[in-house]
């Protein structure tokens, strides 16, 4: 199972290296990693997606807390969250299929950010599932390049689990 960890760290040189080293020494892969300033000055938030069972993630959490500069570690996998990812996608787009690609982009609320004679570059923001879906739809045109950020996430203060609400809508 993939787990999403939210880690608050002191914003100091080498902290990301120490965290990556911890994972490497234990033979664990980090599937997605996003780092940026947090709400408090001098603190950064690291959001990472890590494969593993609950026991493994619990051990990793304990190991992370042993590192200096780590303030808080939270497994937010089962917590209601707002999750987003950014993707830039360059797709083949000649005069014959350009309008179809633009229409598909509108369905996914993607923005065209660059145009050339034979390609379009799209900006897509959304949950990770949306990224997979648009890639599948645009694959038939020929994808030239993809650049994706890692997943970022914040817990929902409302406590509303949108995944649960989506499952209810699907049943109706």
Image (cartoon, rainbow, N blue to C red):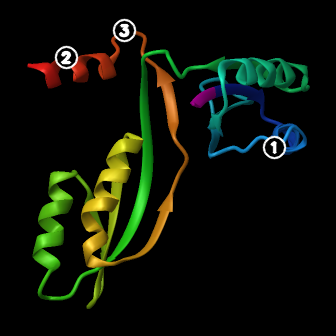
**How much space separates mark 3 and mark 2, taking CA atoms?**
18 Å
Answer with the quarter of the image where residue 41 lies: top right
Residue at numbered disc 2: 168
Q: Is residue 52 left or right of residue 4?
A: right
Count numbered badges in the picture.
Answer: 3
Q: Is residue 15 left or right of residue 8?
A: right
Residue at numbered disc 1: 20
Which span is picked out in magenta? 1-5
Q: Mark 2 falls on what kind of element? A: helix
> For the residue carrying disc 3, how many other residues have a C-alpha within 10 Å: few (<14), some (14-19), or many (20+)?
few
Residue at numbered disc 3: 158
Instruction: First in sequence, mark 3 or 2: give its number.
Output: 3
> For the residue carrying disc 2, how many other residues have a C-alpha within 10 Å: few (<14), some (14-19), or many (20+)?
few
Does residue 109 lie above or below 120 as drawn? Answer: above
Q: Are marks 3 and 2 in contact (CB under 8 Å)?
A: no
Q: Residue at x 83, y 17 (%)?
A: 62
Does residue 126 lie above or below 81 as drawn? Answer: below
Q: Is residue 144 left or right of residue 51?
A: left
Instruction: First in sequence, mark 1 or 3: give its number.
Output: 1
Q: Mark 3 falls on what kind of element? A: loop
Q: Residue at x 43, y 51 (%)?
A: 86
Q: Residue at x 55, y 46 (%)?
A: 150
């Amino acid at each position: 199972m993939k787990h999403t960890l939210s880690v608050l760290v002191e914003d100091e040189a080498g902290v990301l290296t120490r965290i990556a080293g911890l994972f490497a020494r234990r033979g664990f892969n980090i599937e997605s990693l996003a780092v940026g300033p947090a709400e408090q000055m001098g603190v950064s938030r690291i959001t990472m997606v890590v494969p593993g069972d609950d026991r493994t993630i619990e051990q990793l959490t304990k190991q992370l807390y042993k590192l200096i500069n780590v303030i808080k570690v939270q497994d937010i996998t089962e917590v209601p969250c707002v999750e987003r990812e950014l993707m830039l996608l360059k797709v083949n787009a000649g005069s014959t299929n350009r309008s179809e690609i633009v229409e598909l982009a509108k369905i996914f609320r993607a923005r065209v950010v660059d145009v050339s004679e034979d390609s379009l570059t799209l900006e897509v923001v959304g949950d990770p599932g949306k990224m997979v879906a648009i890639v599948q739809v645009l694959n038939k045109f020929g994808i030239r390049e993809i650049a994706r950020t890692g997943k970022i996430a914040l817990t929902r203060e409302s406590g509303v689990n949108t995944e649960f609400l989506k499952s209810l809508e699907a049943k109706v």
